[in-house]
Image (cartoon, rainbow, N blue to C red):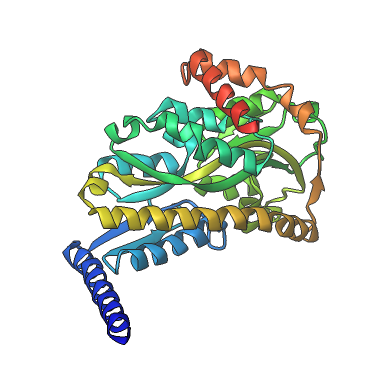
């Protein structure tokens, strides 16, 4: 009996050593790679914290063969500029939202259409589930981009310096800054705003110089960029659009990575995504308290009252050719399926 037990223990030890060495050999065979990751988040924002967490985990899970350099604050340019650089290999990776990815695969435009989702969990079921399966057909890869996965960015809300917006008609005539994303432009136009595109890097000067009356962004962005210092007195929780930051890597680089390195990146991305999603949700109430303490007036609204104005935005997306009616219908089916 003792001999049998000893034999079993010895066999188990040998298996452990062999498997351990196999993993070591896999890492040893992997060529070291440094990935320059760009994002547009400021220091302190959830996206920046998640980027750093991803960098740490990718290095750990790859056995030290992957080093991720995080470059935030739009160091490599705005979202469209980063996407273009990733597609041609000028930079290795970036975090960009679906509205930017829509320029490479129009179906991604649909994720950011206004007032689609009931809450965060509903949005996650869409982008992690049936929508992900729908777009997983090599379209992005053919444009030089591999989307590792969806993280988070948050529901967007409206700030302005002129009026406490409680109803859609109070937006009429306000000069509102948006990025160049058509969904946001058409959403604000549907509510009667005069829309002006300003690069995020120029947002603070534009608000301070009163080139625009207001802007719209997730709560974390509003707080971490201290928009109350730009005379943004009023924050209306319109929650008009949700989208996430997507970890995108140059496809040629992705294909050069070993299987173990790709698995390491996917695992690190999934954990960074979960971290960012939880952080965004947990921090919103805290951010709102801090914004109120800084003097901003926080205004809750009837979301349905705003949603009723959005047919214009959907029609414009189709009429401009950004998406097709068939794609809109398919997306609405996916959204409804995720709701059930």
Outermost residue on the left side: it is 29
**Label total for image:** 0
Outermost residue on the front side: it is 1
Closer to the camera in the image, 117 or 183:
117
Coordinates of residue 197 in the picture (x, y in percent): 54, 34
State which quadrant residue 142 falls in. top left
Closer to the camera in the image, 252 or 4:
4
- Going 27% across and 61% down the picture, which residue do you hit? 34
* Quarter the C terminus occupies: top right
- Going 38% across and 51% down the picture, which residue do you hit? 76
Coordinates of residue 144 in the picture (x, y in percent): 28, 37
* Quarter the N terminus occupies: bottom left
Could one spot residue 332 in this view of the protein?
yes
Could one spot residue 211 in this view of the protein?
no
Coordinates of residue 264 in the picture (x, y in percent): 34, 58
- Going 60% across and 32% down the picture, which residue do you hit? 338
State which quadrant residue 20 falls in. bottom left
Q: Is residue 175 left or right of residue 246?
A: right
């Amino acid at each position: 009996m003792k001999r049998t037990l000893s034999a079993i223990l010895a066999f188990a030890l040998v298996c452990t050593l062999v498997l351990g060495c196999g993993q070591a050999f896999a890492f040893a065979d992997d060529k070291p790679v440094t990935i320059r990751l760009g994002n547009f988040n400021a220091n302190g924002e959830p996206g920046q914290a998640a980027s750093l967490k991803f960098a740490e985990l990718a290095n750990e899970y790859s056995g030290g063969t992957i080093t991720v350099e995080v470059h935030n604050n739009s160091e490599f340019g705005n979202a469209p500029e980063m996407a273009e650089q990733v597609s041609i290999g000028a930079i290795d990776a970036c975090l960009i939202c679906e509205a930017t990815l829509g320029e490479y695969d129009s179906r991604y435009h649909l994720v950011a259409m206004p007032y689609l989702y009931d809450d965060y969990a509903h949005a996650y079921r869409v982008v992690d589930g049936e929508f992900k399966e729908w777009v997983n057909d090599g379209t992005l890869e053919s444009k030089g981009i591999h989307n590792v996965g969806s993280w988070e960015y948050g529901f967007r809300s409206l700030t302005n310096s002129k009026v406490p917006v409680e109803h859609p008609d109070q937006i009429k005539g306000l000069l509102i800054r948006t990025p160049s994303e058509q969904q946001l432009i058409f959403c604000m136009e549907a509510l009667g705003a005069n829309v002006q595109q300003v690069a995020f890097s120029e947002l603070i000067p534009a608000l301070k110089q009163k080139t625009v009356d207001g802007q719209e962004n997730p709560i974390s962005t509003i707080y971490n960029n201290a928009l109350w210092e730009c005379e943004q007195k009023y924050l209306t929780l319109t929650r008009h659009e949700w989208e996430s930051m997507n970890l995108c890597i140059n496809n040629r680089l992705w294909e050069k990575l070993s299987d173990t390195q790709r698995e390491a990146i996917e695992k690190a991305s999934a954990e960074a995504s979960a971290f960012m999603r939880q952080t965004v949700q947990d921090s919103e109430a805290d951010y709102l308290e801090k914004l109120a303490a800084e003097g901003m007036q926080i205004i809750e609204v009837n979301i349905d009252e705003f949603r009723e104005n959005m047919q214009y935005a959907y029609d414009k997306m189709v009429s401009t050719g950004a998406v097709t009616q068939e794609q809109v219908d398919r997306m609405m089916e996916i959204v409804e399926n995720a709701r059930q």
